[in-house]
Image: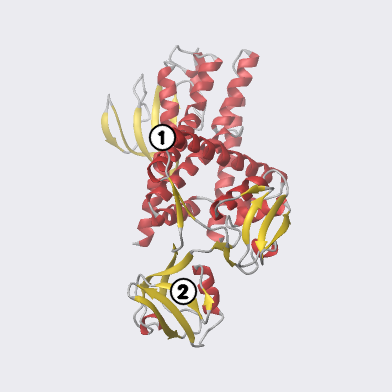
């Protein structure tokens, strides 16, 4: 059941983005008077589809099938993308027959450079618009809710935060001289600053301000592996979601909804900290303090030999929060700022891959990672899931903009070269170019699948 849920959230998160992307190419083709022969969700063999001449049909179309101005809307076997087959364009289909006859008025080849570029960039533009629209919608409808704190309640052992010198009880005051108002504000400023130069982080410790100098490269590497750097703000607590009756948690009387406050006098700020504390107390009785609707309770609990107590827990906000509401104009501006910030960070991440500062294994993830993230954000709520979709839509746009053969950016390179030369590039060259791109993409897919399986 859990696997089906993960697959469902993956489809819900990715398929709309693919449809919107391909719709961008499709609409751009229609606006320029160019025929679109196929509109496919998925790659590979046709499972079923519909066109206005032949109606609905299962399986592949006959080998003699010709578009002749109609579009076949289809679902294909491999859920790894989609495509629009534009008449007269040599693309991933590697259809070389288009160059065997003179360009026809309804073909891609017959259009001018601006029209060709418009068709190539249509998908990227639609993904950017979708990402911005989602961010605006979420910001306007939900606003922004943040913990009203800048104080660190937990630092994970061996985390980047611990290596940077951060401690429990530190209050983050400013980053590079700019004051921060909340914990999440501090993390966002830290991420943006690290992509420019070294970070000067000022914290209030024991009623005195302490300056920590964080090397930008180390911060970037840390963020790529763990965005929260291993720190948890004050105002968070682990909350029980489920209890196994015959395990230590059930025997100790814990119930779903209980908020765990401390273990043997150690305040609990997160699930990670709870796991760490339980692992340190295998087969050892410990005093657990928890809060229920009728008040605060104490119980003795003994983790088993694996350091587990048979409970499902999740982090929950229990402290004071600040909620900011936006007008539609303010939401539009905030959405644009978020979109720009995410875009800069994506391109900086790509730059780090090219320079070797960050490895492909650290940063690249595939369908399995996306499915897990989609499920995790859906568990948090609709706003978190939609925000995840916005980031994925932006990522799809940025990745397609790269000048790699078989991607939109690669197609644009050919269009611009032909525009400068004022003649078509030979078909053999285009075919080789696309084959190289497809080989690179397949290699990347193998790598990200391997990364997913070994994480």
Q: How crowded is the residue under tag 1: few (<14 C-alpha within 10 Å), some, or many (20+)?
A: some
Q: What residue appears at the point 50 percent right and 84 percent down from the top-left corner?
A: 305
Q: Can you tell which quarter of the image residue 169 is in?
A: bottom right
Q: Which residue bears the numbered disc 1? A: 328
Residue 311 in view (yes/no): yes
Disc 2 crowd rating (10 Å Cα; few below 14, some 14-19, many 20+) is many
| Residue at x 39% of width, y 46% of height | 142
Q: Residue at x 35, y 70 (%)?
A: 257
Q: Is residue 114 left or right of residue 167?
A: left
Q: Is 331 placed above or below 323 here?
A: above
Q: Residue 273: where, in percent of width, then height?
A: 54, 71
User: Residue 176: x percent and y percent?
Assistant: 69, 48
Quadrant of the drawing holding the C terminus: bottom right
Q: Which residue is more in the foreground, 243 or 170?
A: 170
Q: Earlier in the sequence, mark 1 or mark 2?
A: 2
For numbered disc 2, what is the local secondary structure? strand
Residue 377, percent from left and from top: 43, 53
- Circles 1 and 2 in contact, beta carbons < 8 Å: no
The reply, left or right, for residue 167 in relation to residue 366 is right
Q: Is residue 43 visible?
A: no
Q: Nearer the viewer, residue 6 or 345?
A: 345
Q: Quadrant of the N terminus?
A: bottom left
Q: Indicate the position of residue 161 as horizontal and vertical percent values.
A: 65, 62
Residue tagged 2 = 261
Q: Is residue 447 above or below residue 249?
A: above
Mark 1 and mark 2: span between their CA atoms? Answer: 40 Å
Q: Secondary structure at mark 1?
A: helix
Numbered label attached to residue 72: none
């Amino acid at each position: 059941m859990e696997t089906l849920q993960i697959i469902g959230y993956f489809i819900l998160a990715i398929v709309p983005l693919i449809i919107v992307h391909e719709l961008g190419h499709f609409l751009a083709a229609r606006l320029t008077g160019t025929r679109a022969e196929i509109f496919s969700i998925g790659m590979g063999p046709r499972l079923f589809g519909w066109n206005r001449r032949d109606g609905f049909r299962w399986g592949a179309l006959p080998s003699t099938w010709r578009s002749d101005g109609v579009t076949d809307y289809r679902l294909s076997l491999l859920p790894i993308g989609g495509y629009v087959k534009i008449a007269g364009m040599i693309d991933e289909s590697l259809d070389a027959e288009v160059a065997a006859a003179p360009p026809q008025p309804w073909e891609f080849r017959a259009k001018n450079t601006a029209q060709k570029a418009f068709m190539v960039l249509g998908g990227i533009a639609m993904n950017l618009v979708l990402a911005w629209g989602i961010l605006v919608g979420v910001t306007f409808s939900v606003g922004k809710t943040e913990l009203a704190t800048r104080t660190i309640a937990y630092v994970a052992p061996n985390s980047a935060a611990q290596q940077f010198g951060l401690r429990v009880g530190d209050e983050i005051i400013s980053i590079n001289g700019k004051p921060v108002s909340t914990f999440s504000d501090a993390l966002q400023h830290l991420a943006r600053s690290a992509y420019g130069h070294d970070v000067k982080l000022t914290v209030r410790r024991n009623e005195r301000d302490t300056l920590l100098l964080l090397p930008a490269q180390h911060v970037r590497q840390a963020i790529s592996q763990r965005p929260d750097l291993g720190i948890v703000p004050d105002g968070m607590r682990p909350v029980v979601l489920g209890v196994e009756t015959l395990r230590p948690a059930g025997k100790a009387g814990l119930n779903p909804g209980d908020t765990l406050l401390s273990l043997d006098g150690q305040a609990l700020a997160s699930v990670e900290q709870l796991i760490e504390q339980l692992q340190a107390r295998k087969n050892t009785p410990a005093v657990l303090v928890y809060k229920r609707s009728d008040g605060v309770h104490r119980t003795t609990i003994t983790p088993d030999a694996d350091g587990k107590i048979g409970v499902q827990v999740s982090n929950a906000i229990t402290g004071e929060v600040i909620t900011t509401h936006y007008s539609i104009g303010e939401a539009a501006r905030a959405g644009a700022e978020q979109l720009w910030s995410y875009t800069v960070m994506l391109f900086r991440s790509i730059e780090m891959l090219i320079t070797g500062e960050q490895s492909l294994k650290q940063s690249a993830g595939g369908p399995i990672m996306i499915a897990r993230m989609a499920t995790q954000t859906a568990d948090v709520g609709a706003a978190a899931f939609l925000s995840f979709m916005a980031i994925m839509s932006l990522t799809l746009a940025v990745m397609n903009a790269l000048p790699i053969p078989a991607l939109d950016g690669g197609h644009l390179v050919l269009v611009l070269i032909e525009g400068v030369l004022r003649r078509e590039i030979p078909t053999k060259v285009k075919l080789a170019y696309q084959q190289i791109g497809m080989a690179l993409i397949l290699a990347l897919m193998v790598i990200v699948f391997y990364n997913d399986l070994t994480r």
